[in-house]
Structure formats: C-alpha cells, structure tokens
Image (cartoon, rainbow, N blue to C red):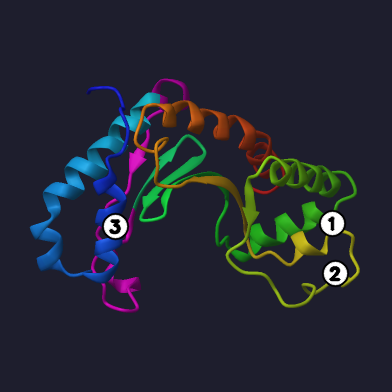
Amino acid sequence: MAGFTGFPREATTFFKQLESHNNREWFLAHKDVFEQACREPLKALVAEFDASLGASRISRINRDMRFSRDGAPYKTYIAAGVGKNYISLSSQGLYVGTGMYKPEPAMLQRFRSAVDDERAGPALSKLVATLRRKGYQVDTHQSLSSAPRGFSSDHPRIELLRMKDIVAGKLFTPGPVLATRKLVSGIARVMADIEPFGAWLARYVL
C-alpha cells in the first residue's frame, strides 16, 4: 500500500452530501468517490501507525438498522480504531481522540469512584486542565443536570462527576493539513498528548 498523502477535498464534501442524501441509490452512484477519497486514504493513514500500535480496524459505513431511528442506511462518517485511539472522518474534518464512551453502569460507577478518590481524582483534573490549555476538547456526550446519587453538589470535581462518559481529542478541520502528509505528524502529536489521559482511564476505570 502506498503511504498516506492526504485526504482530497472530495472526502469531506462526500459526507456533507451524504447527510442530505442518505439513501442507497445516491450512495451507490457515488460509491467510487467514497472508496477513492475516503476509505482508501483512511486505510493508508492508519497503516502509518500499525507498526507501533498494532493492526487497526476500519468500521463499515453501513448502519445497523436495528439501531437506526430515522431509517438512514449509512453513517455520515467513517472511523477506525488505532491502538487505544479513535479516528473519525466526517464533513467536519478528521477527529482523533480517546476515552470512555457510553459505558455500562458498572464502568461509569468506577469512573465516578476514581474521580471522587483523593489521589486519582485530582490527577484527572490536572490532566484535563493541561489538555484544555493545549487546545484539546475534553468533553462528554451528556452531563447530569445535578450531582449523581451519593455525591455532593459542591464536590470539587463536580463537573467530572456529572459526566456520563468522557473523551479527549482534537478535530483537524478541512484545509491544508488534512490534504497533506503533514496530517500524520499532527495525529502522532495528538496521540502522544492524550496518552496520559488514556492511561488514567486504563488504570482506574477500563
């Protein structure tokens, strides 16, 4: 496989159009664009990291219709697992991150117990503050409106306790970096910066 050289502009444009034309007829008519502008470059990109992080896995674009609330047959992104990291290409660009997403109740409870712990909790707060200071997104898909059961609303780490999951990463928006090999070094830098955050989760939660 040839080395990664960037995503063409058609990659993000494809997903933007798919958001408005999410049906089998449109997808089949534009499948060659998906393969050449999205899937093949992503395969080349993740292959750059396989030697150091292990074999990666690219997800299918077809949605599991059992969980498709609106009946749309395709995801509006393509993603890959690279080591403990997640890479996703969509109309917004390329996201690179790691974390804990929509965990089972037992895992969420372990997370909250670790946040509450007088050693592990402050360590996570410091990691989150450092990442945010560097411009990374550290967030959750959903937060409770109040403190979770068993915790005080004035807890010093209440923001973290209210999170239902937590992820940290960076979005490379469409532009020069996304379209060139420079993206490889950019992703490597993100993975290195978020590694301590991932290690905290691996030690206390996962």
Count of marks overlaid on the render: 3
- Estimate the x, y position of residue 90 in percent, counting from the top left: 36, 53
The residue carrying mark 1 is 116
* Label 1 crowd (10 A; few <14 / some 14-19 / many >=20): some
Q: Which residue is drawn at 45% across and 47% down?
A: 173
- Residue to which mark 2 is pinned: 151
Callout 1, which amino acid? Answer: Asp
Counting from the top left corner in percent of width and height, residue 117 is at: 86, 51
Q: In which quarter of the image is residue 204?
A: top right
User: Given this view, does label 2 or label 3 mark the residue nearer the observer?
Assistant: 3
Q: Name the N-terminal-most of marks 3 and 1.
A: 3
**Structural distance between the alpha carbons of marks 3 and 1:** 41 Å
Foreground: 190 or 160?
190
**Nearer to us in this view, 185 or 106:** 185
> Which secondary structure dominates the residues rendered in magenta?
loop
The residue that label 3 is drawn on is 15
Is 186 drawn above or below residue 23 in the view shown? Answer: above
**Is residue 9 found inside the magenta-colored segment of the image?**
no
Q: What element carries label 3?
A: helix
Q: Residue at x 32, y 33 (%)?
A: 6
What amino acid is at disc 3?
Answer: Phe
Gap in angstroms between the C-alphas marked 2 and 3? 42 Å
Q: Where is residue 184 in the image (x, y as percent from the top left)?
A: 43, 28
The location of residue 56, given as percent across then percent down, is 37, 35
Residue flagged by tag 2: what amino acid is it?
Phe
Q: How far apart are marks 2 and 1 (CA)?
A: 9 Å
Callout 2: SS? loop
| Quarter the N terminus occupies | top left
User: Which stretch appears magenta?
Assistant: 49-77
User: In the rendered structure, which disc, 2 or 3, sits on the residue that comes first in sequence?
Assistant: 3
Q: In this view, does 126 lie to the left or right of 99?
A: right
